[in-house]
Image (cartoon, coloured by chain):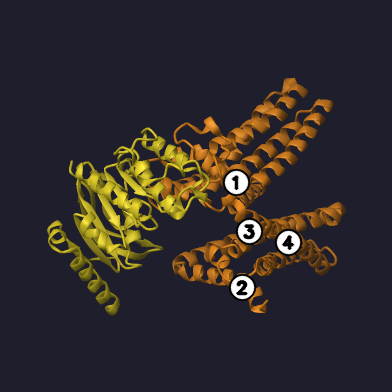
Amino acid sequence: MDEVLKAHNVSAGYCGHRIVEGVDLLLRKGDVLGLLGANGSGKSTLIKALTGQIRLLDGGVEILGIDLASRPEQAKAGLGLAVEPSDLPGGLTGRQYFELVASIRDCPPDGWPLPAILERLRIEDGLDRLISACSLGTRAKIGIAAALLGAPPLLIFDESLNGLDPVAAWEAKSIMTELAATRRHAILVSTHVVETVPTLCTRALLLSEGRLAQTWTASDLTHLPPAAFEKSVMQLLKRQSATA
Amino acid sequence: MNPRQDRLILRLIWRQGLNALQKTRASTLAQLLGLGGFFLAYVIADLSVGLHNSAEKLRSLDRFWQFGLPAAASILGAAFGALAAGEAAAQAQAPFLLALPLSKDSRQRAARLAALALALPPAIVFGLAISMACVVIEEPHPLARAFFAFALFLAGSAARIFLQLRAAFKDEAKAADKPARVRGRPINPLGRLDRRRPARLGQWSLSLVSKRLVLSMGAVLFVIAAIASGASLSQGHAAPAVLAGLAGGFLLFMLTLRCDPLASPALRATPLGFFSAWSALLRFPLALAAGFYAGPAAAAAIAEPHALAIPVGAAFILLALCAGYAVFAAFYGRRPMLAGFSYLSALLYTAYESIEYGRPILLAFAGLIVFLWSHSRGKYRHG
């Protein structure tokens, strides 16, 4: 099956208040979808809804054809989320956190889809330190590495490139590209680093006030020079903040 | 220091409270006020009738008025003081405040003022409740009793607040040194015990427990259990050892169980089911409670060999008490103090009402446990 994530008319929010409304998404193996939007546009809420962390107010989400609402455990078996640094278990070391994730995913603690992930992300030295004592960048790398454990077909990175040093950010992007190229994974990346999108992603979409405001296909991203893409996103964002 | 800064933490807590109230849906608020009001009115009416019926007996309990009430007021005050101090310290040590040009002393002073202000309303309510109870049972000098109870409650709170905040701010200095001291491999107290799927969850949960509190409480409970076991062995009665083992085991379970990981996306976005995660969190606290109970239970079995049913039955009671608390702890997630208060209140109220109404109340309590469990499961799975 090529379809990894299918979201239909997703609406989600908090305390009955809708933050995201009527979002449709389809991710196939090999896709790298860039999720763009201003602060408060609903990117993180959408990711929380897609990963089963908040209840949907409308619509449905399927991961590998399994309905997330009715069979959450089975659906989440196909999902790897890079947890935000602040949400990582500070009382464990990086190595122990990998052991926890690996035991849940029934894979060895070094069951990464590509070789030398720890070396490439340069986190071997910090692995035996408590996560709470690690720097923001190291914690972000631990979150990324843990998401890859067990090679889940759907990989979701919510602003995970923030706080990484240039080498680690470059390696993280290379890992994503290589994984997508294997056509065994689909990747969703939410980011504010707009210039990353044309080189990393095969598709992109812009979220504004919880709705899809603009989409870019693979051919758009290929044909638009990165600077022109960045400019078009900025113009859209400025226009939206002016009308808001 | 600017006197406005003395009220800084109090203002923060007040505004956060107001914001939370504004965020709450009107229907939820109406439900809370309606159901809560109804329940409160019922409890007050029920207690008034109970007090009125036993008025004469209560008036004659000299020891209660001389020692029981003052002790209860101080202990309850200290418990509320701990809650207030915890909240105030959390606010005063928030990273955004640490980054502002405020001295440690000024933050501590502001936290103390806020905690005392938080402890004042419960002290007033406690004093009023005592005065009303005195009026109902026609005890002379209700105002004096109320004032005395209020003052002791507040003194208990103030003492606890002072001590807890002093310790919290002392630890803050130690925490600042921590990055320099955390080198090499941290101690892993559970080691191989925590290798079963899901591995390391016990250690995660244990890292959230205050080791100092558990060690000091554990030492006190151990001494009490040893004395009770000695009493059982010398008198040939199982009861003292069993009771000490039961209470101690349960308290240790409450102190060491932390269900915070159930609220974390690090678990909730994985294919781990609620029951597996929840039961893995219980492993270590349950083993600790069982280990603690084993000593006094063995002493009870030796003291009264023909009455083995007592320690065995109490072991099942301990298991039931722990399971009930584990459900409350899962429901309250990151607020174990609230879980403890709610569970103990629910237990006491169930015990009180079941004397009058019997089995239906026990069934209602079981229903509450099932409801909380299924709500927690739903929250874990879908948010």
Disc 3: host chain: B
Q: Do marks 3 and 4 both belong to one polypeptide chain?
A: yes
Q: Do marks 2 and 3 both belong to one polypeptide chain?
A: yes
Residue type at numbered disc 4: Phe
| Residue B177 image offset from top left, x and y in percent | 61, 53
Q: What residue is drawn where x is 17% and y is 43%?
A: A2
Give the distance between the C-alpha atoms of the residues marked 1 and 3, in whole angstroms. 14 Å
| Residue A149 image offset from top left, x and y in percent | 35, 40
Instruction: Classify residue B107 as left or right of residue A15.
Output: right
Residue type at numbered disc 3: Gly
Residue beneath disc 3? B86
> Upstream in the sequence, badge 1 or badge 3?
3
Residue B182 visible? The answer is: yes
Give the distance between the C-alpha atoms of the residues marked 4 and 1, in whole angstroms. 22 Å
Give the distance between the C-alpha atoms of the residues marked 2 and 3, in whole angstroms. 16 Å
Badge 2: few (under 14), some or many (20 or more) residues near its Cα, within 10 Å? many
> Upstream in the sequence, badge 2 or badge 4?
2
Rendered orange, the chain in question is B
Q: Do marks 1 and 2 both belong to one polypeptide chain?
A: yes
Rendered yellow, the chain in question is A
Numbered badge on residue B8:
2
Question: In terms of secondary structure, where does tag 1 sit?
Answer: loop
Numbered badge on residue B162:
4
Residue beneath disc 1? B209
